[in-house]
């Protein structure tokens, strides 16, 4: 149908060659069939728990459905309402504010700690183990711990504030301090994970580069600027994008500590979706917001691929 007759003939031959390569009786064909059998559970799992919910979410987003009544087809009305919904727009803004408020400090703190722990000093392993503990604690448990720490009566922050003469500190009840409170606990939780990734990247850099630089008279700052950071760029790009995506998906701390409040100060996009879907029973509206959320994450993933491709071509 497309191309010259010679090109169509080549495509036809290539298809039959691939078909014989899989359905034939050669050892290579049997290996391919066996590989497909082993991969089949993964394909089924991906289809059942990723592809089907994805298409079902888009399908539901075209309806008005309160879970307890019959769905009513609306077309793209839910999407048009979202772009004029101040609460949705505010949730997108809050998600960006939280995400970049968390990840930017994490990048530099994790890199600084990685440079420290990449060196040998007494008690290094013990300090590294202690500092990594927050990463292995459940996010739910971690949020409950910080809920106690933010308690206005006996929480560590309130006690410290009273010692400094500051009274009435209620970090989770004040719109101006609720988001910084969420950011602080998330930075402390996420930094150890990315610190370990940076340490792995640092250890992959050959020592020969540093030895050659020292022979040429380079100091520690010059080694950092002209050897460590350029060679660590792929790791840094990976940490940047993965941390942003993970920050955008936050839900547990907001749900446990503030429930999106006070007002809508900490109502991130995932919280907006949860509340509309399961509290207000607007499942179609929440599904439309989920599709928009997916598009935002896809855009971030595309940025990641572009950055990595640019880095490889540089």
Image (spheres, helix red, strand yellow):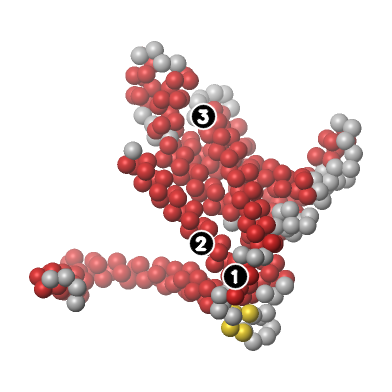
Task: Name the mark on residue 295.
Answer: 2
Circle 2 Cα neighbour tier, 10 Å, few/some/many (<14 / 14–19 / ≥20): few
- Residue 259 position in % (x across, y down): 74, 59
| 3 and 1 marks in contact (CB < 8 Å) | no
**Lower sequence index among marks 2 and 1:** 1
Q: CA distance from mark 3 to mark 1?
A: 49 Å
Which residue: 61% across, 65% down? 83
Along the line of sight, which residue is nearer the eye, 130 or 65? 65
Q: Is residue 193 left or right of residue 140?
A: left
- Mark 3 sits on what residue? 115
User: Quadrant of residue 180 in the image?
Assistant: top right
How busy is the neighbourhood of tag 1: few (under 14 within 10 Å), some, or many (20 plus)? Answer: few
Q: Kindly identify the residue that appears in the image at 56 percent across and 32 percent down.
A: 113
Residue at horizontal 50 percent and vertical 44 percent from the top: 240
Q: Disc 3 on helix, strand or loop?
A: helix
Task: Mark 3 vs mark 1: give the one in front.
Answer: 1
Instruction: Kindly identify which numbered label has been placed on residue 80.
Output: 1
């Amino acid at each position: 149908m497309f191309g010259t007759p010679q090109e169509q003939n080549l495509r036809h031959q290539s298809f039959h060659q691939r078909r014989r390569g899989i359905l034939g009786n050669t050892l290579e064909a049997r290996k391919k069939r066996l590989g497909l059998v082993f991969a089949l559970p993964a394909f089924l799992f991906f289809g059942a728990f990723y592809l089907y919910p994805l298409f079902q979410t888009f399908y539901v987003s075209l309806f008005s459905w309160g879970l307890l009544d019959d769905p009513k087809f609306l077309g793209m009305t839910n999407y048009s309402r979202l772009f004029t919904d101040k609460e949705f727009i505010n949730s997108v803004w809050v998600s960006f504010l939280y995400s970049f408020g968390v990840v930017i400090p994490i990048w530099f703190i994790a890199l600084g700690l990685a440079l420290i722990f990449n060196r040998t000093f007494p008690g290094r392993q013990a300090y590294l183990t202690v500092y990594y503990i927050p990463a292995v604690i459940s996010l739910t448990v971690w949020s409950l711990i910080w809920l106690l720490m933010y308690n206005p009566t006996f929480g560590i922050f309130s006690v410290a504030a009273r010692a400094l003469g500051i009274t009435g500190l209620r970090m989770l009840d004040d719109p101006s301090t609720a988001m910084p409170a969420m950011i602080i606990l998330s930075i402390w939780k996420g930094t150890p994970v990315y610190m370990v990734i940076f340490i792995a990247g640092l250890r992959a850099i050959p020592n020969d580069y540093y030895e050659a630089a020292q022979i040429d008279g380079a100091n520690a700052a010059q080694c950092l600027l002209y050897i460590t950071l350029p060679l660590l760029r792929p790791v840094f790009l990976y940490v940047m994008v993965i941390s942003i995506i993970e920050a955008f998906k936050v839900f547990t701390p907001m749900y446990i500590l503030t429930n999106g409040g006070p007002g809508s100060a900490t109502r991130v996009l995932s919280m907006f979706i949860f509340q509309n879907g399961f509290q207000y029973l607007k499942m179609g509206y929440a599904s439309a917001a989920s599709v928009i959320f997916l598009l935002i994450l896809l855009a971030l993933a595309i940025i990641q691929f572009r950055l990595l491709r640019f880095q490889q071509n540089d």
